[in-house]
Amino acid sequence: MTELAFTRVAVIGAGTMGAGIAQVCAQAGADTTLNDISDEFVQRGLGTITRFLDKGVEKGKVTEDARASTLDRIRTDTDLAAAVSDADLVIEAVPEKLELKNDVFLRVAKSCGDAAVLATNTSSLSLRGVFADVPHSDRCIGMHFFNPVPIMKLLEIVRLESTDASVLDRVRTFAGQLGKEPIVVKDSPGFATSRLGVCLGLEAIRMLEAGVASAEDIDKAMELGYRHPMGPLKLTDLVGLDVRLAIADYLDGELDSPAFAAPDLMREMVKRGELGQKSGRGFYDWRAD
Ligand code: CAA
């Protein structure tokens, strides 16, 4: 069996993305530690992973053995210093707030080993900002996963100018071992995926606001006309309106383009708590799901 590029992974943040990332690392054979600030959060993350694996077994996509060994390889730890101390790869997946990510990496850098590679799952923030307080930026990189992580094939690797070529190679190899297809993008606002994806999502909301068509028909336009697996409004519901609004506001400040100005409708919906699938309501009613 080929040796894994990383054998001990620590994932910081046990939300939807962190849980999915921990699952694919453990499924690939890495000893994986899932960390968050409370036991309630890590247990919730573990619950997400267990449910996904159970469904995989039901669908015949995951064997009973793979389910059991994946869960065996995941341990949880609410102490960040302990979680990263013996990791050869640390992947941060905490909410998209620069100060929060800075604080996490400041603490990770103090407690991880000298050779550990530090990765962020940020979907848009400048890596230079995220790793501002990490002394060894040659070992820093972006590993941007997509929701639902165990199913989506892409890994967007983001490299800083300072990222060492051997680190990039190792992460690229690991992507393949996770069953992902990597692309490599330089550190720039929104990278390739969020810059294009958010642009389409915001235009769809502007069209809905202007009464061009119903949400269902706008989505159908892209699903049937362009073969997107999911229309831009449904996808915004899946990602979360709050998450996409934060990315839009960031890109609006960074890129010289009117395309990233968030529509009023989006701001109002976020204010009303209509965040998409996770809150039960967004452009669609998800309460029955
Ligand atoms: N375990 C293993 N495999 C599973 C599974 C499980 N629990 N559940 C589903 N699968 C497999 C299915 O068997 C199926 O495999 P095949 O294609 O080999 O048959 C595949 O996964 C798709 O599953 P379904 O057929 O059940 O579901 P679907 O066809 O309705 O697709 C979807 C669901 C993958 C979410 C699809 O709608 C899709 O691709 N949507 C777009 C998602 C997207 O764009 N995500 C990116 C969001 S942006 C982001 O994440 C970045 C960010 O920074 C915020």
Image (spheres, helix red, strand yellow):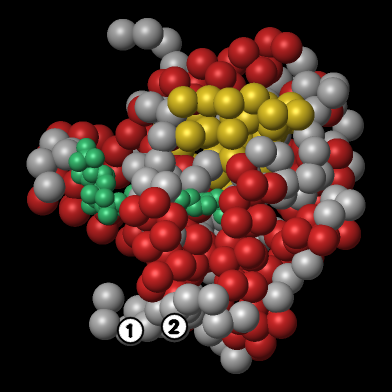
Query: Residue lying farthest front?
Result: 212
Where residue 271 appears, x then y in whole percent? 66, 88
Q: Mark 1: which secondary structure?
A: loop
- Please report the residue visible at 51 percent of the width from the left and 16 percent of the height from the top: 173
C-alpha separation, residue under disc 1 versus residue under disc 2: 7 Å
- Label 2 C-beta lies within 8 Å of the nearest ligand 1 atom: no
Label 2 crowd (10 A; few <14 / some 14-19 / many >=20) = some
Whether residue 75 is visible to the viewer of this picture, yes or no, is no
Whether residue 144 is visible to the viewer of this picture, yes or no, is yes
Q: Quadrant of residue 203?
A: bottom right
- What residue would you read off at disc 1? 287
Relative horizontal placement of residue 66, taking residue 169 as reference (left or right): left
Work out whether residue 167 or residue 153 is closer to the camera in this orientation and state it: 153
Disc marking residue 53: none
Three-letter amino acid code at the position of disc 1: Arg
Query: Above or below — where is 105 with respect to 289?
Result: above
Label 1 crowd (10 A; few <14 / some 14-19 / many >=20) = few
Work out whether residue 264 or residue 76 is closer to the camera in this orientation and state it: 264
Work out whether residue 57 or residue 76 is closer to the camera in this orientation and state it: 57
- What residue would you read off at disc 2? 281
Three-letter amino acid code at the position of disc 2: Arg
Query: Residue lying farthest bottom?
Result: 272
Q: Are marks 1 and 2 in contact (CB under 8 Å)?
A: yes
Query: Above or below — where is 72 with respect to 289?
Result: above
- Label 1 C-beta lies within 8 Å of the nearest ligand 1 atom: no
- Please report the residue visible at 68 percent of the width from the left and 17 percent of the height from the top: 167
